[in-house]
Image (tube, grey):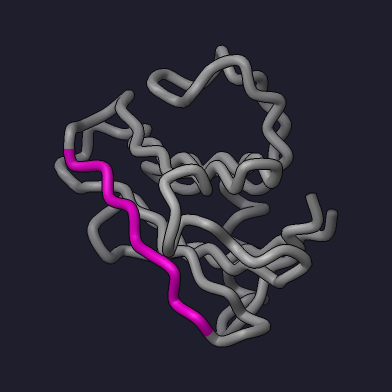
Amino acid sequence: MRSRLRGRGTVALVAAVAAAGLGMVTATPASAAGAPTGINWDHVWNGTGVRVYVEEYGDIISVCDTSANGHSAFVTVDDWDLNISHYKATVSTGKGTCVTHRASQGGKYNLHEYSNIGLTFEGQGGQGSYAVNFINDH
């Protein structure tokens, strides 16, 4: 289970994340209004106005809007090893709500095993996005 930031502007992003006190955190499912409960999330990332949860087993990805700022939160899910764009999930129902997709939905939601999965997410209307990745190894 590896996680790292990638892409242009990584140094600036890391500095901004550190300054804002954001980044990878460990949270219990109960702390996420609207996110599926009963899941021991493998990864949880926070950004301004957005939180993204990942459970590798079952390829469950949930994106939540965490700010009443008038902007939708979203995450794009890509396979960086195979250069495949899987999907974009957008939360347009306001603060405290989430959108979740999982492998059991089939097709684009069933991520390749042992691939480097990249997530790009944001929640402030184009004012800055975050890029993270993980190896989908279980």
Q: What residue lies at 49% left-to-right and 23% top-to-bottom?
A: 36
Can you say whether 131 is above or below 65 in the image? Answer: below
Judging depth in this view, the residue of 33 and 20 nearest the camera is 33
Q: Does the magenta-highlighted stretch encompass residue 20?
A: no
The segment highlighted magenta reads: 84-92
Residue 40 lies, in percent from the top left, at 71, 25
Q: Is residue 121 left or right of residue 11?
A: left
Image quadrant containing the N terminus: bottom right
Q: What residue lies at 56% left-to-right and 12% top-to-bottom?
A: 30
Residue 37 lies, in percent from the top left, at 54, 17
Location of residue 111 by image quarter: bottom right
Can you say whether 35 is above or below 116 in the image? Answer: above
Judging depth in this view, the residue of 130 and 28 nearest the camera is 28
Judging depth in this view, the residue of 24 and 110 nearest the camera is 110
Residue 64 lies, in percent from the top left, at 39, 36
Q: Is residue 62 left or right of residue 67?
A: right
Residue 120 lies, in percent from the top left, at 48, 65
For this orientation, the residue located farthest to the right is 1
Q: What residue lies at 62% left-to-right and 52% top-to-bottom?
A: 19
Magenta span: helix, strand or loop, mainly? Answer: strand
Q: What residue lies at 62% left-to-right and 63% top-to-bottom?
A: 132
Q: Does the magenta-highlighted stretch encompass residue 91?
A: yes
Location of residue 54 by image quarter: top right
